[in-house]
Amino acid sequence: MKALVLEKQLELSLRDIDLPTIIGPDDVKIKMHTVGICGSDIHYYEHGKIGQWEVKSPMVLGHEGAGTVIEVGENEKILSVGDRVCIEPQVVDKKSKEYKLGLYNYDQKVKFWATPPIHGCLTPEVVFPGDMVFKIPDHLSFAEGAMVEPLAVGMQGATKAKIIPGQIGLVMGCGPIGLVTGLAALAGGCSKVYIADVLAEKLKMCDHYPDLIPVDLTKENLSEKIMDDTGSWGVDRFFECSGAVKAYESIFTCCSPGAHVVLIGNNAEPVPMNWAILFAKGLEYHTVHRYSHQYEPSIRLLSSGKIDVKPMITHTFKFDESVEAFERASEHRPTDVKLQIKIDEEK
Ligand SMILES: [Zn+2]
């Protein structure tokens, strides 16, 4: 089947490759419609690896996918042919202790799409276990369906933050994950969420979201602004989504006593920690690695309109333009938020 294949670092081709086509009793086959390009796809393209995961053989990219069910296995009871769906891109081992405890995102044996050596979904048809495939309602587009994957990361962050209604949040980094985290924190009860970045073009996205308050770090002093606005209290919930070491400093200058700090941005370098402030303020730390059980709540929030991801989809490419799409993504234009590839041109 034709697919977008990462041959090795910096080498992509749209070519035929052997992929599973026969479904097992618990599987469904999906005709892919739209696939979003994730930061991790771009990172594998640019660097050939992320942490412990290294591209050692050709791999199909893409893990943010939505499409239509075209075949169901004999054990499948919920999905039927014709259902519009999005796919949680991890195949879990139901015998694992992590799975039994609801922590399947920490199971090292999880097979996650487009994480070496597992092929992703930038291809016209995929076979996948039915229990990780979720229906989307007719009024959501496939493009929105493909946004459930990054949204699930933000939802995991908001869930870990244990938000109390009315609290004030701060997100560091106004990329796609920062934005979905801010939106999930608002949906989870924050009254407003500051979102800080060094690129004014990225912060422009806040024009679409009145309760996301942009802070341009090149023009404003973040902690002064936060302390002025909160009567010197600080933010109750802090989300690190930038991956920048410098962003961690704001934990100690912007958080209120008892604040929860959620670390989502991937950081390769060791980060200095001010333990004295952490102790004195009683900060609680949480980390996010992918997500578990976030697809259904994410779809409900998109369905109800409480979260709107449409403004974030800034450009859509055709499947034939997949290589160009990745070249464009690796330009890292600050005005490109989410680039998607539309595989099925019929709809
Ligand atoms: Zn992703």
Image: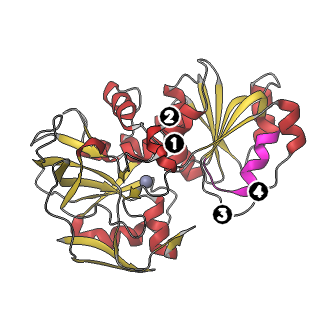
Which residue carries the number 2 mark? 183
Q: Regarding mark 3 in the picture, which secondary structure is present there? A: loop
Foreground: 209 or 121? 121
Whole-number angstrom distance, CA of label 2 to CA of label 4: 27 Å
Helix, strand or loop at label 4? It is loop
Q: Quadrant of residue 78?
A: top left
Q: Quadrant of residue 170?
A: top right
Q: Position of residue 266 (x, y in %)?
A: 60, 56
- Establish if 186 lies above or below 70: above
Q: Is residue 290 visible?
A: no
Magenta highlight: main SS: helix
> In the image, is residue 55 above or below residue 267?
below
Disc 2 versus disc 3: nearer the observer: 3
- Image quarter of the N terminus: bottom left
Neighbourhood count class around disc 1 (C-alpha, 10 Å): few under 14, some 14–19, many 20 upward: many
Q: For mark 4, what is the residue?
A: 271
Query: Looking at the picture, which amino acid does disc 4 mark?
Result: Val
Labels 4, 1: front one? 4
Whole-percent x, y for residue 290 in the image = 49, 48
Neighbours of disc 3 within 10 Å: few (<14), some (14-19), many (20+): few
**Residue range corresponding to the magenta coloring:** 241-252
Q: Distance of mark 3 from mark 1, alpha carbons? A: 22 Å
Question: What residue appears at the point 75 percent right and 61 percent down from the top-left corner?
Answer: 270
